[in-house]
Image (cartoon, helix red, strand yellow):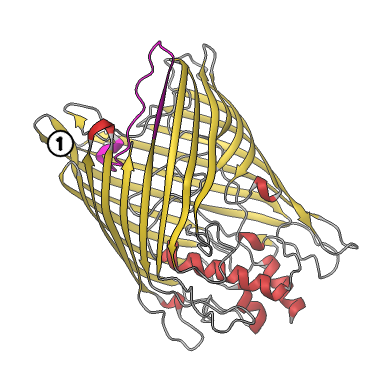
Amino acid sequence: MLSHFSKTAALAVVLLVPSPAWAQTSTPVAPAAPPPSRAPAPANAAFSDQLVLDTGRTPFSRPTSDMHAEVHGEYQVRYYRKSDLPLTPPPGAPDAASLGQKNAVLHWMRITPRFYFTPKIYLAGQIDYPQGFIAGEETRFVGAASEPLNERGAFRVDPRWLYLDAATDYGHWRVGQQGSHWGMGILANDGNHPSLFGDYRKGAIVERVLLAANPGGKASLLTTAVAADLVFRDNQAELTNRDLAFQGVVMVVYGTDRNQLGLYGVAREQSRGAGSTVPSQPYTDRLSVRIADLHGRFTARVPGAPGYVFGQAEAVVAAGTTRYAQNPGAGPPSQPSSVRAWGGAFTLGTVHEAMREGVRWGDLVLSAEWGYASGDNDPLDGVQRRLTFDPNHKVGLVMFDHALSWMSARSAVNSDFALRGAYAPGLQFLPSNGGVSGAAYFYPTFVVRPRHWLDLKGAMLVAQTTADLLDPYRTATTGRRSNYLGGDPARRDLGVEFDLGAEARVALDYGLTLQLGAQGGVLFPGRAFDDNTGNGLKTQVVAVGRVGLQY
């Protein structure tokens, strides 16, 4: 049974899709766009993302001819109250049949300094300290998750960025450790982009040398860029865990910041500093993947009305080979598995403008997002088809970020227990960590702002899997294909989720903004969550209290 399990668990893993490597979502040769101002936009201003999503952030000032420094950032506290999710108990721990956590308090202080040498050259940094899990019950047997919340620690540190940005006559350079973000952030997300519901975590960080230029001159709408990366951290690699991932990037963007079309190619070569534990069968985990990603966005005024329509889309195709899906204990190493994955997302919305005493804001925002990530019905056929979105591309509060996230993390831990310490390549990629994985969804949202400082918001999420929802642990140990709770994996309905929230932004002295809010989500699970007796998963609830200070 153990031999059969090893083969199944080693192959039935989440697809290793490399993150596209680019730090900006807008025209590359422009300096990094500052976050939206905490103050309302003035009358007669052009379209601003602040009309759609007001983050309350304080922007960096426009650089002058004088050498100067600025420091901005935030301090955030979150209280989570959630359903104690039923999970498959690991071998030898039959009492651990749930997550074990109903309450959690988290916090983080994000500090983002910037030192200007000249108006065109600056040194930027970012660090999260202190940050961590302050209080609440510890989770049980989900340590494979990127943030398992299984050990309290309020004073952890996460050094994120330190790079030099320089605009020259012949191009724009950015060199150093920096965030990697592209398009809608479904594959590369720097963990610094707020969303309507949920919070950002960690994010993609690379050691990068980048050069961008306008081949037709500074007034040209065409921008090209090349970059070379050593990945410090993303969803597929972590340098501190002996993962070596190198990326080469070529990118072309045409248009303005608000209306543009971009295409890039990424070549990724990755290896892991661990391999077979069987001396007679040595090999090294390797991934070789090529990606093509197309992203576009637009905004346009509504004719004869005070408002805009807006939208953006991103589509990605990945192809290559991987040895992370090999079995080191069942004979000589086989041929690498093929990687063939695809997916994308599309958002369309409208925002109505309100005007009062010279102040303009978006008092009604309606939008909808459609998304698709390819799944894998047969992880043993030598082709890895499953695609997982970056967890920082938030879609709801409960279905992906709670239920499927913890279920996939428990499956990885259970698999590791059953292997009795034997090395299983690719098992570390089984947890979805809250990202959309092998699923298609429809996600309409709304925001009502009776005042520019108050958001009342809601969303609905409907989703189903794009392939059978397989738990490799149960499938291997029971001898039959099963979902995470032992049910029929061919049932693909993930259910319906409803989210509501409110947030107030209060301007204080000294350029500070106080944020007070609450969010909550209710998931009515579909048949994809049925257990081995055909009983459905009980309604899952997540409630979040939010307090923050932007500076």
Kind of residue sitting beneath label 1: Pro
User: Which region is colored magenta?
Assistant: 49-72
Residue 470 placement (x, y as % from top left): 57, 72
What is the x, y in percent for residue 195?
Answer: 36, 48
Residue 51 within the magenta-colored segment of the rendering: yes
Residue nearest the observer in this picture, 534 or 456 = 456
| Residue that appears at 31% across and 42% down | 55
Which secondary structure, mark 1?
Answer: loop
For the N terminus, the quadrant is bottom right
> For this rendering, which residue is in front, 85 or 396?
85
Q: Residue at x 30, y 63 (%)?
A: 520
Q: Is residue 302 left or right of residue 249?
A: left
Write down the residue under mark 1. 306
Query: Height in image: 503 above or below 183?
Result: below
Q: Most extreme residue toward the bottom, as rendered?
A: 533
Quarter of the image where the C terminus is located? top left
Mark 1 neighbour density, 10 Å: few (under 14) some (14–19) many (20 or more): few
Question: At 61% from the left edge and 39% from the top edge, which residue is drawn?
Answer: 266
The overriding secondary structure of the stretch rendered in magenta is loop
